[in-house]
Image (cartoon, rainbow, N blue to C red):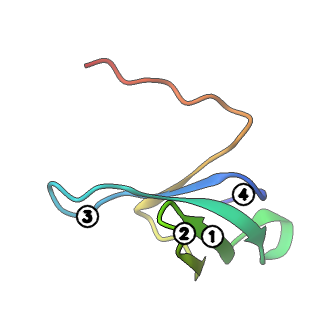
Amino acid sequence: MHASKGDKLVQHGRTVGQRDKVAEITEVMGAEGSPPYRVRFEDGHEAVCLPGPDSEIRHGDIPRRKMPR
């Protein structure tokens, strides 16, 4: 996993109906973009995060594709 300051960390919900948690990466604490990351969630909560397999990084320079409905 590789991230830069300003990228988004998305932690996918683990159960049906649970929303994804989205946080902005405010500091990369590992070497060469690797975890841990200091993040700020949408509600203002800040934490140090070691993302698991249910997480993904959305880079700020790559637009997200919309899923068809």
Q: In the rendered image of this protein, does residue 69 appear above or below residue 14?
A: above
Q: Secondary structure at mark 3?
A: loop
Q: Secondary structure at mark 2?
A: loop
Residue to which mark 1 is pinned = 39
- Which residue is drawn at the image coordinates 54% and 69% (left, top)? 44
Sequence-wise first label, 4 or 2: 4
Task: Tell me if mark 2 has few (under 14), some (14-19) or many (20+) residues whose alpha carbon lies within 10 angstroms of its own.
Answer: few
Instruction: Look at discs 2 and 3 and give the one toward the viewer.
Output: 2
Instruction: Look at discs 4 and 2 and give the one toward the viewer.
Output: 2
Residue to which mark 4 is pinned = 3
Sequence-wise first label, 1 or 4: 4
Can you see residue 60?
A: yes
Q: Quadrant of the C terminus?
A: top left
Residue to which mark 3 is pinned = 14
Q: Position of residue 45 (x, y in %)?
A: 52, 75
Q: Position of residue 47 (x, y in %)?
A: 58, 80
Asked whether the beta carbons under mark 3 and mark 1 sit within 8 Å of each other, the answer is no
Task: Tell me if mark 4 has few (under 14), some (14-19) or many (20+) residues whose alpha carbon lies within 10 angstroms of its own.
Answer: many
Mark 3 is on which residue type? Answer: Arg
